[in-house]
Image (cartoon, helix red, strand yellow):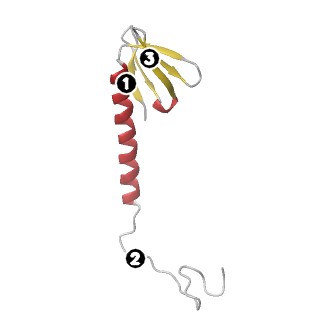
Amino acid sequence: MMIVLTRLNGSTFAVNPDLIERVQETPDTSVVLVDGATYIVTESTAEIIDRITDYRARVISRASRIADDEQPTAPRLGVIDGEGTRGSRKGGR
């Protein structure tokens, strides 16, 4: 997943917000990535922060849904050996 930003000429591009080092307005908004690449964009710092916040919320939401989908719907069955260990094979570890 990425966020979409707009260059001054109107073209759009997507950037991974995890690679953004800083955003500054002087007066144009500059987005500086961890590798040193700099992009001048039309969005304000506040707009970019909102997009990053929305991005992170979507990541957490999707991860939560995936985790919920992986939950077993019925109890798991396992073999109990003489020591009461669940899921281990009888006689083996």
The C terminus lies in quadrant: bottom right
Q: Which residue is mark 1?
A: 48
Circle nearer the viewer, 3 or 2: 3
Q: Amino acid at mark 2?
A: Pro
Answer whether labels 3 and 1 touch (C-beta < 8 Å).
no
Residue identified by numbered label 2? 75
Question: What is the distance, in whole Å, between disc 2 and disc 1 at their CAs?
Answer: 45 Å
Q: Quarter-wise, where is residue 91 in the image? A: bottom right
Task: Give the residue displayed 39% in from the left and 31% down from the top.
Answer: 52
Closer to us: 52 or 46:
46
Q: Position of residue 23 (x, y in %)?
A: 45, 20
Identify residue for label 3. 24
Q: Position of residue 77 (x, y in %)?
A: 46, 80
Question: Which residue is drawn at the image coordinates 48% and 23% (left, top)?
Answer: 22
Q: CA distance from mark 3 to mark 1?
A: 10 Å
Vertical placement of residue 75 versus 14, above or below:
below
- Asked if residue 66 is positioned above or below residue 49 in the image, the reply reads below
In the displayed structure image, the side of residue 35 where residue 51 appears, left or right: left
Pinpoint residue 42: horizontal percent, then vertical percent.
36, 13
Q: Horizontal placement of 18 versus 61: left or right?
A: right
- Above or below, comparing residue 77 to residue 15 in the picture: below
Q: Nearer the viewer, residue 45 or 76?
A: 45
Q: Residue furthest right?
A: 92
